[in-house]
Image: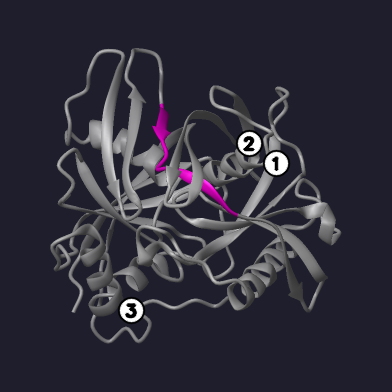
Amino acid sequence: MISAIQTVEMHTGGEPLRIVTDGIPVPEGRTLLDKRAYLRDHADQYRKFLMFEPRGHKDMYGALLVPPDHPEADIAVIFMHNEGYSTMCGHAIIALGRYVLDYGLKVKETDETPVNIQCPCGLVRAVVETKEGVTGAVRFESVPAFAYKLGQFVETREYGPVEIDIGYGGAFYAVLEAATIGLDVRNSPARDLTAAGAAISEAVKAQIPISHPEEADLGFLYGTILTDGKTGRDGNSSANICIFADQQVDRSPTGSGVTARMALMAARGEMAAGETAIFESITGTRFNGKILRETKVGPHAAVTVEVTGHAYYSGTAEFTYEDGDPLAGGFLLR
């Protein structure tokens, strides 16, 4: 039986974030990954209750705050979506940075305030602009990001052989220019882009084994990013759309996706430490990205990336469960 659950509703670049403030018991487990696994395996009814209809929708996204086990973290978070639980989420980090300060989980400083957020992929360091007259601006430094595969071909039923790159930015993404499969990120219907992203994700999952060199739980393809083929380095934004989980569409430019894209550009010699780029989503909202430094993850040359965006509040809610309602647990029509 689910009792009332309270939430704070936010969005970053149009991408929703439903932050659970009360009503879900802290999952069992010593580490954050343990808690994530417990929620997935033993208490998944809460995710369905909040993400699915009639309280949510196919593209809803959520965050459950739990006690951190990292000594430097201010909070820890478990991300949830229509299919399960992700390892990293940049748009959520940007929103949570504001939430932590506005709801008194950490004291605001004068001009900007650091907020350290433990994610399943590791510790993410965010900075919230808190000077007077600035609303919603947050930047974060990614976990180390790297190119996993460059110029890899997969066979698809819809498009034949398709060339992709696979990048890690806290989650693994297949990345390709939309024009190579006859689509345009800025002008093609969203349903066509979504179907293409889903088809390519399925092909990659079936044909390319993916592993993370340091944590087995991170070794899976999260989604596909279709781009306009530009770099975003010349002052003009590079448009992209991210299709992840079960054909879920990110309304924001995708923070972990921006990180993965910049890691791929660094691997190709197209970007270096200190350089910046601008990325635009299907809603027209933008994230700025900057390569901070070079590093390594296992055998992979890697970079850390700073991503900047804006988050805003859209409301608060209390969700309830009524006995006798056959659809109370949640459902999806598409």
Q: Residues within 10 Å of mark 1 (few under 14, many from 20)?
A: many
Point out the stretch of residues depicted in magenta: 136-148
- Front of the two marks 1 and 3: 1
Q: Earlier in the sequence, mark 2 or mark 3?
A: 2
The residue type indicated by label 3 comes to Ala
1 or 3: tag closer to the N-terminus: 1
Residue found 18% across the figure and 79% down from its top = 1
Cα separation, mark 2 vs mark 3, equals: 39 Å
Residue 210: image location, x then y, percent: 52, 67
The chief SS type of the magenta part is strand
Q: Which residue is mark 1?
A: 239
- Residue corresponding to mark 2: 279
Q: Is residue 307 above or below residue 209?
A: above
Q: Give the residue at x 40% y 62%.
A: 218
Q: Quadrant of residue 248?
A: bottom right
The mark that comes first in sequence, 2 or 1, is 1
Mark 2 residue element: strand
